[in-house]
Image (cartoon, rainbow, N blue to C red):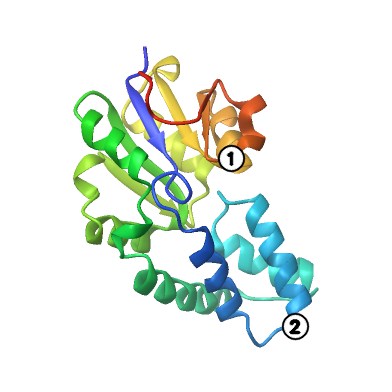
Amino acid sequence: MIKNILWDFDGVIIDSAAIKEYGFREILKEYDEYSVNKLIEYHRHNGGLSRFHKIEYFFNIILGKNINNYEILYYAQLFSEIMRKELCDSKYIIKETIEFIQNNFNNYNFHIVSGTEHNELNYLCEELNLSKYFISINGSPTPKNDLVSTIITDYNYSLNETILIGDSINDYEAAKINNIDFYGYNNKSLENKSKIYLNNFNIVI
């Protein structure tokens, strides 16, 4: 019996894909298009990883340049400013997910575990009037594996009563590392990795 649901944010609760890609292109517009496109491709395949990791990956791996923590934080802050401005519009909320959450938050223990920066994530949830549905809202730079582990430990959740709902391979890996079931959503490539693949929320979890 499922009692605890850990939710990814981007692509599951909010449809932020186009805005995130715009954000990366905007903060890196001084660099060549080919390199930025390689980052966008990496971002699409690793939706659950934090922007801090992706910015570091862009410089270290794609450009072959060193970047220090101060510089990573500088670019991450630019990115966050764009996200705060663009994503506060309720039109980006994924309707069927929110309807399920609104109808069931008293029936389960809901938490958010996201690659989105922690303060920005909490800001967006407040602005979109979502915070009241979740016991905790947790974001990067803490890796998602650790966010999941901390919730399970702090709340003494049973592994067989806890699931993670996500749309990326990183969500699947975070669930697998922590020995909880993974329910895929909004990404058909995850069907064969999911305990249950959610085509919609018209089911009883």
Q: Pointer 1 and pointer 2: residues touching (CB < 8 Å)?
A: no
Q: Which residue has dot 1 on it?
A: 187
Residue 123 position in % (x across, y down): 29, 62
Residue 40 is labelled as none
Q: Residues within 10 Å of mark 2 (few under 14, many from 20)?
A: few
Can you see residue 44? yes
Q: Is residue 183 left or right of residue 9?
A: right
Q: Quadrant of residue 153?
A: top left
Q: Is residue 146 left or right of residue 40?
A: left
Residue drawn 29% across and 43% down?
136
Q: Quadrant of residue 125?
A: bottom left
Up the image or down, 162 lies above or below 60; here it is above
Amino acid at pointer 1? Asn
Sooner in the amino-acid sequence: mark 1 or mark 2: 2
Q: Residue furthest bottom?
A: 30
Up the image or down, 116 lies above or below 104; here it is below
Circle 1 SS class: loop
Circle 2 SS class: loop
Q: Which residue has dot 2 on it?
A: 32
- Separation of residues labelled 1 and 2 (CA atoms): 29 Å
Residue 158 position in % (x across, y down): 39, 18
